Amino acid sequence: MIFIAVSKDGGKVTYHDTKRHLWWASVLSPSVPGLSALMLAWSGQPLWSLVPLAFYYLVVPILDVAFGEDTNNPPEEVVEQLSDDSY
């Protein structure tokens, strides 16, 4: 989605949110312990209790190193539009 705003000096500011489709991933991290507990209860296999540890201490740091720092921040002029977006 493209957001358009007017800057303080009257210029046109456009911002294309390229990571919009990744917002759904924010529900994955909090669901890991619950899913692990469900799998432990369903299967009885105690190794399922290690999944949250592996996810938070192995997978997340590896992804953090792989993707690096995000330098694509939206301009201040479109921040209010982004916060009003229901997606």
Image: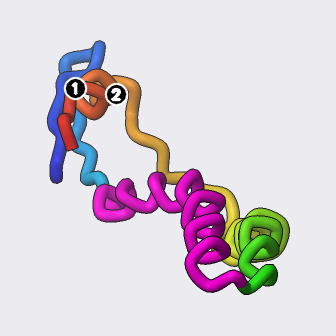
Within the magenta stretch, is there residue 27?
yes
Which residue is under mark 1?
Answer: 84
Distance from Cα at disc 2 to Cα at disc 1: 9 Å
Q: Position of residue 15 (x, y in %)?
A: 27, 45
Q: Position of residue 48 (x, y in %)?
A: 72, 78
Tell which circle, 2 or 1, labels the residue nearer the N-terminal end.
2
On the rendered image, what quadrant is the C terminus found in? top left
Q: Position of residue 71 (x, y in %)?
A: 57, 53
Q: Secondary structure at mark 2?
A: helix
Task: In this rendered view, identify the residue nearer to me: 51 or 56.
Answer: 51
Which residue is under mark 2?
Answer: 79
Q: Residue at x 56, y 78 (%)?
A: 42
Q: Residues within 10 Å of mark 1 (few under 14, many from 20)?
A: few
Q: Quadrant of residue 44?
A: bottom right
Magenta span: 18-44
Task: In this rendered view, identify the residue nearer to me: 74 or 21.
Answer: 21
The reply to whether dot 2 and dot 1 touch (C-beta < 8 Å) is no
Q: Residue at x 66, y 75 (%)?
A: 40
On the question of residue 12 being in view, the answer is no
Residue type highlighted by circle 1: Asp
Numbered badge on residue 40: none
Q: Quadrant of residue 58?
A: bottom right
